[in-house]
Amino acid sequence: MKHNLNIQPLNTWINQAGKQPLVISGPCSAETEEQLVATAHLLAQTGKISALRAGIWKPRTRPGEFEGIGSIGLEWLKRAKAETGLPTAVEVATAKHVEEALAAGVDILWVGARSTANPFTVQEIADALRGVDVPVMVKNPVNPDLSLWVGALERINNAGITKLAAIHRGFSSYEKSAFRNEPMWDVAIALKTLVPDLPIINDPSHITGARDLIAYVSQKALDLDMQGLMIESHIDPSVAWTDAKQQVTPAALSDIIDHLALRKPEVRNTEVNDKLHELRNQIDKIDDLLIQKIAERMQIVEKIGNYKKDNNITILQVNRWDEILQKRVGYGKALKLSGEFTEKLLELLHSESIRKQTEIMNDEAGQAKEKLTHA
Ligand SMILES: C=C(O[C@@H]1C=C(C(=O)O)C=C[C@H]1O)C(=O)O
């Protein structure tokens, strides 16, 4: 299913000339004029950066932390831009931020993850953008809700902003993991599937929260055909006022970029394309067989459901289900399938089997309710 947004291609609003891939970089927070301008110069000297980012209004989870230097930072950004020629980007969270940033000549605005999660805030920002021709990037909401992300993009787009991109910065989770914010790549893939023309920029700094993982996540983002990277950098990350662990020096950033492998969605080589085509034909045949076999399995489930109904036997049979899980996961492992994958696949089959049998067991009212909950 496709979703239509009125969007201009990325290269109409950000100059990527000679720079592969597209990278936006700069400090998490503008701290002092010297820190920002010096970082900007070092970034510009790498010749690998398309825009300079800096947070000047910082939404912080807990009170008492540094909440951004505020409007004075806009003056520093102006100077950094005048001296380096780099376009500038800041986060905006209120109509006032939008007005001030535009008045200061900021080139690109972005909406942060906490703001995207709040439609009132997004609408306020969208209303402040009406009649303005400025590029806007929308970070994913903190929770993995694709509709909320698309909704925010729609609100900005409906205000007339066509220079639009999404930023994938990962999602909050209660459980501790190697990442600061779980990438949940599937959500970004779903967005790309839904709105193929929308550029997606990955933010490995906020996903990882740790500079050592930035290269790995950046490579994965590019391999998922994302259009660019937003990576935080600081002239001296060890003394950064915010997010010190995830910032890199401009030199380290340059090194990360140099080691990224650039792959294209398509190549023009006929031999390569023929081989891909042949392999995809094999996959198509196997997928057809899989669907056929799943349908056959479901027909047997139906028979079991009817038999259970006639003999008053419960639908769920924990021991049988457990036996299936153990055996098939083991079998899968022997065939080099990960246990986690086989388990997920079986769970999907089992829950559909339970649903089907519930349909068979229940009266019409029950069936209608089941249908509603699965609609
Ligand atoms: C099909 C049955 O009902 C349920 C579904 C199962 C399945 O789809 O394999 C297994 C056990 C039961 O929880 C059954 O009892 O065999």
Image: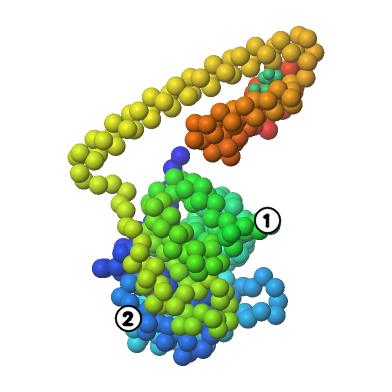
Q: In the rendered view, does 302 fall on the left or right side of 16?
A: right
Tell me which label, 2 or 1, sits earlier in the chain: 2
Assign ligand 1 to one image quadrant: top right
Front-most of 200 and 155?
200
Residue highlighted by disc 2: 45
Front-most of 227 and 336?
336
Task: Determine whether 143 is above or below 320 in the image.
Answer: below
Q: Residue at x 34, y 83 (%)?
A: 84
Q: Identity of the amino acid at label 2?
A: Gln
Q: Residue at x 24, y 41 (%)?
A: 272
Task: Determine whether 256 is above or below 227 in the image.
Answer: below
Residue sticking out furthest to the front: 334
Residue highlighted by disc 1: 175
Q: Position of residue 313 (x, y in %)?
A: 78, 15
Task: Determine whether 236 is above or below 282 in the image.
Answer: below
* SS of the residue under disc 2: helix
Q: Identity of the amino acid at label 1?
A: Glu
Q: Position of residue 184 (x, y in %)?
A: 55, 51
Q: Residue at x 35, y 64 (%)?
A: 259
